[in-house]
Image (cartoon, rainbow, N blue to C red):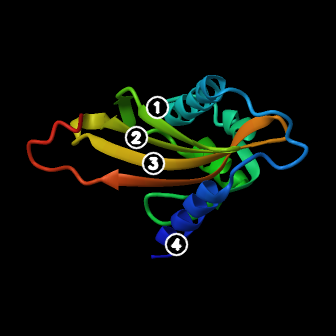
Amino acid sequence: MKRMILVAAMALAACTQQKAPAGDGNLPSVQASDATIDKGERAWAALAIKGDPQVLQGLLADDYAGVTESGEVRNKAQEIAYWKQQPSDFASAGEPRMTYRHFGNTVLAQGQQTLMPKGGAMPMKVVWTDVWMFRDGKWQAVGSQDSVVPAKVGDDMG
């Protein structure tokens, strides 16, 4: 329940934000914003298999708060530390699919990806919602929520 309230609050903040605060300069175009956020989302998603967790240093805002699939809330330092110490349990990952919705200087990014565990276990589908804000001339994630979709018999997890 606590994480649903957090996500609802982040979504409400995103929806009520209409224009960039003073001092942020001009917002990039929707296309340029999507390209920047897409690159960041893909780098973040790639950490499930490989990659340098230090990439999160620039992607996550200093005031970032994220909720994991198990309900743990992490700040920026905790998120980076998790990915540094976490050996990957996955052999491969499907191409992430993402959509972006713009609300002034805030973008709601929603995505999904199928992960293939090592050892031939059932694939795992992960879905997420990330909240990005354009502040100080750059896009950074300020919040996130991850969920695992339970596998069903016969589900190809597309």
Residue 59 point in image, percent of width and height: 69, 38
Q: Name the residue under label 4.
A: 5
Crowding around mark 3 (Cα neighbors within 10 Å: few <14, some 14 to 19, many 20+) is some
Front residue of 158 and 105: 105
Q: Can residue 48 be seen in this view?
A: no
**What residue is rendered at 22% in x and 35% in y?**
120
Dot in front, 4 or 3: 4
Amino acid marked by disc 3:
Trp
Separation (CA) of disc 1 from disc 3? 17 Å
Residue 75 point in image, percent of width and height: 68, 58
Amino acid marked by disc 2:
Asp
Dot in front, 4 or 1: 4
Q: Name the residue under label 2.
A: 89
Residue 13's disc is none
Helix, strand or loop status at disc 1: loop
Q: Which of marks 4 and 1 is nearer the N terminus?
A: 4
Residue 65 falls in image quadrant: bottom right
Report the residue that reaches farthest toward the bottom: 1
